[in-house]
Structure formats: C-alpha cells, structure tokens
Image (cartoon, rainbow, N blue to C red):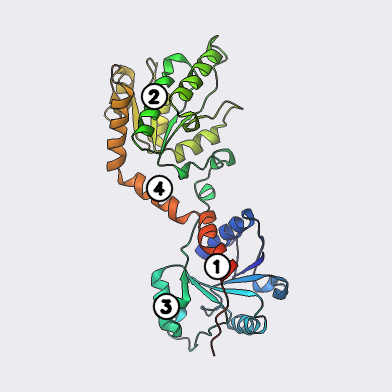
Amino acid sequence: MRLALLHYTQAPIIGGVERVIRDQAAALTLLGHEVQTLTRGACQDLALFDGVIVHNVFTMPFDLEWTRELTAQAAALPHILWINWVHDVVSVNPHYAHIDWQEPVPQATHVVVSEVRRQDYALATGLPVEAIHVIPNGLDFASVLGLTSRVAELRLWDHELVLAHPTRLIRRKNIELGIRTTAALHQSGCDVIYAITGAADPHQADGKAYHQELKRLAEELGVTERVLWLGESKPLTDDDVRSLYVMADALFFPSTGEGFGLPLIEALAHRLPVFCSDLAVHREVLGGAGHFFGKDENAIGISAQIMHWSQKDSVIHHRRQIWRDHEMVKICQEHLEPLLLTATAITYP
C-alpha cells in the first residue's frame, strides 16, 4: 500500500512520537509498503495514498486548523483508509484544561497505544471501547542499541539465550566444550545460540583442521544451526564485537590456558555475566565476579549451572519480553498490517 504518516513534526526533531513514526515508517517500508512521513508544511495530495495514518493531530491542540482540515478530508475521502493513531488525548490532560476545544471524531479507524489510552479516548469521545484498537508502541531495536547491520541481521533477540565467545579458533580456547554445552542446553529445551567471533588463527598450523573438527562435532550433536561462526566469511569489526556483547546474555569462556583473558573484563564492562573455566588467572582477573566451572566438569553440569542462573535472572526475562512485544517490524506485521487489509472506517454523526 501507499501510506502517508502524518504528525506535527518528524525526525530529526527529538520526541517519543517522532521516533515511533520514524521506526514505523522504516518497518512498513521493510514489509514492502511505499511510505512517506509528512508534516503540514510538506503535506501532499492525500487522495494519492491508499492509507493515511494521522499521529496525534486529531486528538491534540497544536494546530487546530490542520486538525479541522484533516477531519474534513477524512469525511470527503472515504475510499482511503484513515487511521487516527492516538498517543495523547487533550481532554484528559490537566495541562490543557484552559483550552476550550471539543475533539472532533474523524471518520477513521481508531488506534491507541495502550489500554489506558483506550479508556481515555472512549471517555473523551463516547466511542464504544470495542471500536478502538490497541497497538503498543515499538522500536527499531537495532537502532536503539546501536547494532551494526551485520549483528542486527542475526536477529539474536529471537532466541532465549545467547552465549558469546570472543576468540580465535585455537585448541586451548576449548570451543568443543562450548559446543557440547550448547547441545546440552538445547536438549534441555533451551533456545540457545553460541556465537564465536573468530576464524582460524593464521599463526596456528592446525587452525583450519580444528575448525573442521568443531563443525563436525556441532553436526554430530545436532546444533549446527545454533553455533554461529561469525568470523568465518570475514573478520568482525570492533563495532561488530561490541554489538555482539550488547545482544549476548552471557560470556562463555572455557579456555584451558590463558595469560590474562581480555574478554572477561570486556564482558563485565558490558554488564554481562561470565561463565568461565576455573583457572588461577581467571580468578585473578575476575575476583568473585564470575561463574566458574572446574576442568573436570562436563557439559551437562555446566549447562545446568547456566540454566539455573538464567531461570533466576529477571533482567534476561524482562529484556526478552520487551523484544518479543515491542519490536516494530513484528508489531507492524501482527497488528497493523491486518488492520490495513481489513479495517473499514467507522462513521459517526
């Protein structure tokens, strides 16, 4: 569909509604729609669009002349899908009590951003509650989190648990334990991803052979799709690695030998829990900040330790819930697109 998104202002002006509109436009474009974001000064002939989504202009008093113009256009162009997208309602806001203005009710499909706003708008207009749709605000999380496109495309937020392992493919890094632990987590019902940053070390003669051994192990254990070899095609940039830390739930660092272990402090700088082998140097670097496992502990025991932590950690669950409920593309797919296809304008006298 050809869609116009209308608001008083738009990015780069900073504001919550402006950000929502920007991300909504990007999501709808990604889904194949032709989208333009317009203000009054840049408004085009709205009859050229299949749908017009009006954010707040019908319900706030910042340009009453434009509000009246759009209300008249909605009545005059009933073949267009008009969506009245309500973020704020002037009549329930005490800061606007001095304004003597009755909100017009346009001939439109009415959308509010929360159940609270639905009750507000129903009270202000007399519309039946069932005539008002609730579609929550969403965000472009890749933009909010500053992810590189390379990491954003992995859609790591779709998974329950992401373990990051910044390392080159060197035998002492003990990546096979990471793969076995991933398999144990998967077998216990956890939707896990194990992300390894590096490629075969050019200074190690058997680096490529080790890589192939690890890939065969992942295949044998049935976790080929759950082990990401991020440096396989080309090296990650520093920004890519930072983005991985942002998206990861924990660092997994099972080395059998280290002189220091720089990813340990990188992970803590990103507020990531650390699961690592119980080496003297790891104790020295982390103090009491790590979750340690002994050299004789197997993958099943380590996976149980990780599962116990993840089930108790409220932050990881809250973050996953936000990603599930408020990713803008998903919101547009599940809530807005069905409305675009099936909604009809409701006419009120």
Label number found at residue 180: 2
Residue closest to the eye, 239 or 51 = 51
Label number found at residue 339: 1
What percent of the width, then of the height, locates residue 243? 50, 38
Crowd band around label 2 with a 10 angstrom C-alpha radius: few (<14), some (14–19), many (20+): many
Q: Amino acid at mark 1?
A: Leu
Residue closest to the eye, 14 or 109 = 109
Quadrant holding the C terminus: bottom right
Q: Which residue is mark 4?
A: 320
Q: Earlier in the sequence, mark 2 or mark 4?
A: 2
Q: Earlier in the sequence, mark 2 or mark 1?
A: 2
Q: Are marks 3 and 4 in contact (CB under 8 Å)?
A: no
Q: Which residue is mark 3?
A: 129
Q: Are marks 2 and 1 in contact (CB under 8 Å)?
A: no
Quadrant holding the N terminus: bottom right
Instruction: Determine whether the residue tagged by mark 4 lies in a helix, strand or loop.
Output: helix
What percent of the width, then of the height, locates residue 98? 44, 86
- The correct choice, above or below, for 50 with respect to 193 in the image is below
Crowd band around label 4 with a 10 angstrom C-alpha radius: few (<14), some (14–19), many (20+): some
Q: Amino acid at mark 2?
A: Arg
